[in-house]
Amino acid sequence: MEIIPTIDLRGGKCVCLYQGDFKQETVFSEAPTMVALNWQTEGARKLHIIDLDGAATGQLLNKEAIKAILAKVNIPVQVGGGIRRLEMVEELLGMGVQRVILGTMAVENMRLVEELCRQFGEAIIISLDAKDGYIATHGWVRLSQITALELGLRLAGIGVKRLIYTDIKRDGTLTEPNFEAIAELVAKLTLPVIASGGASSLWHLERLKRLGVEGVIIGRALYTGNIKLKEALAVGMKKE
């Protein structure tokens, strides 16, 4: 099971939000590149980067910070946040991003998602960001009428290779993941699922591993020290 540290960017800084609320922000570092290098040094094999300003506006507003991270680390990086056009996907892949994460586009323009999956295959990953079971878009501020499972089933039929599932109410809370929702997705979808939101202990990681997720994205718990990256990586690598 992959353990993937996240670097959430807002105004060029590394931050964490509480349940995706821009008014509840904690700044953990003004030097995201150093944060990325630290996670790499501690053994991370992949980084998850979200442009929070981009998620809210539909524009890549932390592009320079992303470029700086890509220039310094030598591990794969996946990037999301407001990517809603073909040109933005092509730009990020051209910068050296391994995977581009799409969210809003999966609800509003599934035809384009299908075309991107046909063109770029494994480089496209879809994030199912759910609040009370329903997908939220545009930086998690607009609630749709489609459930995470319904959208996941549709995406499985158009060539999507893997999914990220985030329970917005658990994100940044240091409570626990939504194990029930994750278990349902893993059981009912044929696609690999990466869990995000709420993981705050090694026990949470062990349970997610037993559920069969491909990976876990961890944010606040790493920055607060609730989870030590090396210990988390050991859980991920441990044979059952």
Image: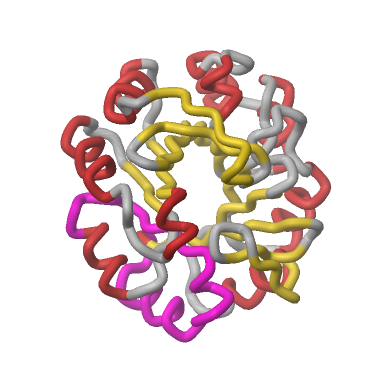
Secondary structure mostly taken by the magenta-highlighted segment of the chain: helix
Q: In the image, residue 144 lies at what x, y percent?
A: 70, 72
Range of residues picked out in magenta: 94-122
Q: Is residue 199 above or below residue 193?
A: above
Q: 53 left or right of 18?
A: left
The residue nearer to you, when weighing 185 against 29, is 29
Q: Quadrant of the C terminus?
A: top right
Left or right of 175 on screen, residue 125: left
Q: Residue furthest front?
A: 23
- In the picture provided, is 72 more to the left or to the right than 14? left
Task: Choose between 86 and 231: the one closer to the eye.
Answer: 86
Residue at position x 77%, y 49% in the image: 183
What is the quadrant of residue 202 in the picture?
top right
Instruction: Assign the N terminus to one quadrant of the image.
Output: top right
> Residue 175 appears in which quarter of the rendering?
top right
Q: Hey, which residue is sitting farthest bottom in the picture?
A: 111
Look at 19% across and 53% down and name the residue there.
Answer: 95
Work out whether 134 lies above or below 239: below
Kindly identify the residue that appears in the image at 58 percent across and 28 percent down.
220
Residue 17 placed where, x, y %?
A: 58, 38
The residue that appears at 33% across and 43% down in the rendered structure is 77
Figure colour scheme: secondary structure
In the image, residue 113 lies in the stretch drawn in magenta? yes
Asked if residue 85 is among those painted magenta in the image, a careful observer would answer no
In this rendered view, identify the residue nearer to me: 226 or 82. Answer: 82
